[in-house]
Image (cartoon, rainbow, N blue to C red):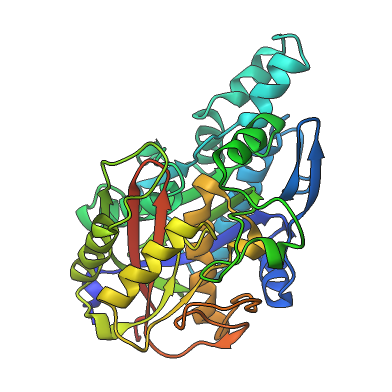
Amino acid sequence: MAAGSRASAIVGMGAVTGYGWGVEHLWNGLISGKSSAEPIEFEEFRGLAAMIPDGGDEEDSITLFGRALYGSGREAVEDARARGWQPGDRVGLILCSSLGEAQGWRELYFERDRRMRRRHFLQLLPSTAPSMLMAEYGFTGPSMNVGAACASGALGILIAHQWLATGFASDVVVSGTDLSVTPETAWHFRELGVVALEGSPEQACRPFQEGSQGFIAGEASATVILTRAPEARPYVHVLGGGYTHDAFHPIAIKPDGVQVARAWSDALADAGVTVDDIAYVNAHGSGTLLNDTVEAGVADHLLAERTRLYSTKMLTGHGLGAGGTLETAIAGLTYEVGEIPAPALVATAHPRALDGITPRAPGATLKSSIGMGGYNCALVLDKLDG
């Protein structure tokens, strides 16, 4: 396995999801096996969505996007401190999002006649909430926004891991926040033919199973804190990662899976592990036919026979730019809890697919994230001894 000197530790987590505000709500929802998605109906759209419930402090932001980012961020910081983390002198922050503050901008143009107070307008800018969260804690390290479609959240963690390895930052807060289930985005995703629309969530979104309609629209804010400082008690370690681009199509993944496989192989090499070390793939697993076929095919081609696949998108919905951060946090929690919250299978499935809640076997996890346009990101996660 990779030497400890190569690893970054995830020492704090926070989450706001369709299950509610907090990691405890997230985990309890996952192990219930019940999806957080519910039927939604807009003027020109009817389907399923896992949407964040209202909450947070309106003094923080008039928008739910901002309040959710603060909510998951504060929970992660307090969680990390409870686990022994002491922030260094260059704490950075990376915000990962695909569509970002879609609801806030929609409200400005459609409900407020393009007018609002100056401080409220500033809250819509993608730089404001991260800056104010850093100001709240006195974090003065580097900060940036990552936009790589649905691979954004995992890429943000990979960048944080690289920042720590080079000394560019002492610690990094990575927030994946995306609240973009609006009438306009829902309608367009329906027209693209990628979202599940009918029936129960379990029947509509079936990653790696026959008959899946596509992904369930989702919202999330998930924050993780990475460090190389030895004093904190980690959930899991990031051992390495890989990142490629298909250079093929504005929407579709390239069917040959070559660049997905390369991202996975690069992640294994960067982490210093072999295919035999990988026990699980926490897959992108969107429930779309092409994506699931490519990921399963890459697993069959590249990984050992014992390696199993799972996806939690039926449960949480597809958080777009936040999905990779949220799913990395979920994968990390499996090392803490000892169980994998895989959804129960409801149809003929790929033989690697897990069927329901499963005790976690020893071994590393490969986290795969794929973004529309050809973004492929992979992380290798494991809990190191000591």
* Residue 208 sits above or below residue 60 on the image: below
* Residue 72 sits above or below residue 351 on the image: above
Q: How many marks?
A: 0
Q: Is residue 65 left or right of residue 299?
A: right
Residue at point 47%, 78% (across, down) = 350
Residue 299 image position (x, y, % from top left): 34, 73
Residue 268 image position (x, y, % from top left): 23, 71
Residue at point 25%, 47% (across, down) = 168
Quarter of the picture containing the C terminus is bottom left
Q: Nearer the viewer, residue 21 or 365?
A: 365
Residue 147 image position (x, y, % from top left): 41, 38
Q: Nearer the viewer, residue 149 or 17?
A: 149
Quarter of the picture containing the N terminus is bottom left
Residue at point 22%, 80% (across, down) = 274
Hey, which quadrant is residue 177 in on the image? top right
Q: Is residue 285 left or right of residue 116?
A: left
Residue 95 image position (x, y, % from top left): 47, 42
Residue 335 shows in the view: yes
Q: Is residue 107 left or right of residue 380?
A: right
Residue 224 shows in the view: no
Residue at point 54%, 66% (across, down) = 207
* Residue 25 sits above or below residue 184 on the image: below
Hey, which quadrant is residue 381 in on the image? bottom left
Q: Nearer the viewer, residue 356 or 240?
A: 356
Q: Is residue 380 left or right of residue 213?
A: left
